[in-house]
Amino acid sequence: MKTIQHWIDGAAHGGAASRTAPVFNPATGEERARVALGGSAEVDAAVAAASRAFETWSETSVSRRTQVMFAFRQLLVEHEEELGRLISAEHGKTVDDARGEIVRGREVVEFACGLGDVLKGSFSDQVSNGVDVHDFRQPLGVVAGITPFNFPAMVPLWMHPIALATGNTFLLKPSERDPSAAEFVAGLYRRAGLPDGVFNVVHGGKEAVDAILIHPGIEAVSFVGSTPVARYVHESATRAGKRVQALGGAKNHAVVLPDADLEFVANHLTAGAYGSAGERCMAVSVAVAVGAAADGLVEVLARKAREVKVGPGDAPGTEMGPLVTRDARERVENAVGTAAAQGATVVVDGRGLKVDDHPECADGFFTGPSLLDHVTPEMDAYKEELFGPVLAVVRVDTLDEAIALINANPYGNGTALFTASGEAARRFQRRVKVGMIGVNVPVPVPMSYYSFGGWKDSLIGDSPIHGPEGVRFYTRPKVVTTRWPRPAQQADAGFTFPTSS
């Protein structure tokens, strides 16, 4: 059986430790590989390689760095199908969904290809007599990314292309549940001409994470995952003097007004709630039905949920695959039972789903779409991030009540409003306390040239990811004030504070 190894200094690296963990195919429940589990020794080796590489990579021209990004981008296009199937086999999502993940990650690579323009500084002539001022940005050094299982290609691609294009070197610690995408991407970078040591991968669990957070050779850490771990990462890494991006969990609401087209809404909410089996930090997990919209919305949502085609991710026609682990399935199905016990109406019950058309999937980690109605903010199904294919419907009387509900929630990642009213949309987007907002768009993930980040418990600290904020995160500014006096020119130094006069 294959063992997925670390990638250090341009080559596969077995590591000092002999510990491994299983990597499953969630559709069949079968173990498909083992992954090496690293710790401080592997992190030390990766940081040492990255530090050596930084000396030359940081001095490499912006033109050359972006040439590597252009070549890497082309390889992502050419190998999209192969990488998509690899992701599907380890995560469980459909191949089409995996391709979409790769495309959204590739958009950040394309943004990185244009960083020559973004990195331009400014120049001010003659700010004082014979004095000019200019500024520019320089890379930090060795930076690290700790990424989740749900987007094994896209989330790392939100980090390392910008970090590398700005002149940093990178250490990636991907999820040990679906580690092969990181190994695949490392190989593409090498083929694209990236020098050895510039991009490194260390697999592992908490031991590897802790080694990254305290390592004195790492200048910055980017993290995406649950809110409790995001807090831990932020506190630990900032205590060690590092910059930190820490993106946490979510409970995303979609508000539906009575003037919305319910068929249109239900199509988009069904995809937003059950796509990728709900294992997305931007998944729609709460539908807030306003006034007269409620009964009709639940009726259409129930029909759509029952029509979702569940099966293995590589089967034609599959719309939703399994959850990533057996424990994840049990947690989600227990949450549906708890919701019923607390008074919610289980309109569609996805528990105990059998994929009869695929006997090879008898032991897979499948559950079906579940739809809950009459959910209240006191119920666990509303308060907890379920990270599964469960859509909860909360009924309110007015848009203002819906806004108050969202603003009272501790999370503030994404939200959406479905309406035909421009006035309602404008009021919603100005008053709601959420970082990313969609109007008739259920999953408002911004384009790569904007930055991704929520509010409240969805973003620990104040550093969103990719786009302009990503460039600022991976660089630091310098401002230079210059004077070039003529040889015969006399200039006396003053003891007062310098001014522009």
Image (cartoon, rainbow, N blue to C red):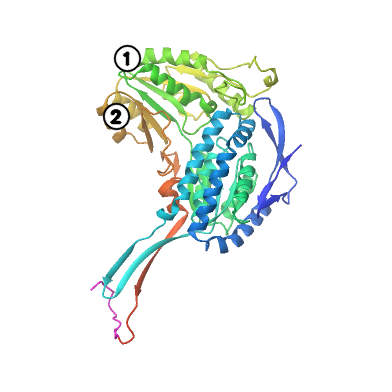
Q: Answer above or below: position of 482 versus 459.
A: below
- Quadrant showing the N terminus: top right
**Camera-side mark, 1 or 2:** 2
Residue drawn at x 58%, y 39% is 78
Helix, strand or loop: magenta stretch? loop
**Residue 221 vertical position relative to residue 338 in the rendered view, above or below:** below
> 426 left or right of 455?
left
For the point 51% across and 43% down, the residue is 230
* Mark 1 and mark 2: Cα distance apart in space: 18 Å
Q: Quadrant of residue 417?
A: top left
- Which residue is found at the position 29% from the left and 80% from the top? 495
Secondary element under disc 2, as helix, strand or loop, is helix
Q: Which mark is residue 292?
A: 1
Left/right placement of residue 12 relative to residue 78 reads right
Give the residues in magenta: 489-501
> Along the line of sight, which residue is nearer the eye, 78 or 232?
78
Taking the image as drawn, is residue 195 in sight?
yes
Amino acid, disc 2: Ala
| Disc number for residue 425 | 2
In the rendered image, residue 496 lying in the magenta stretch gets the answer: yes
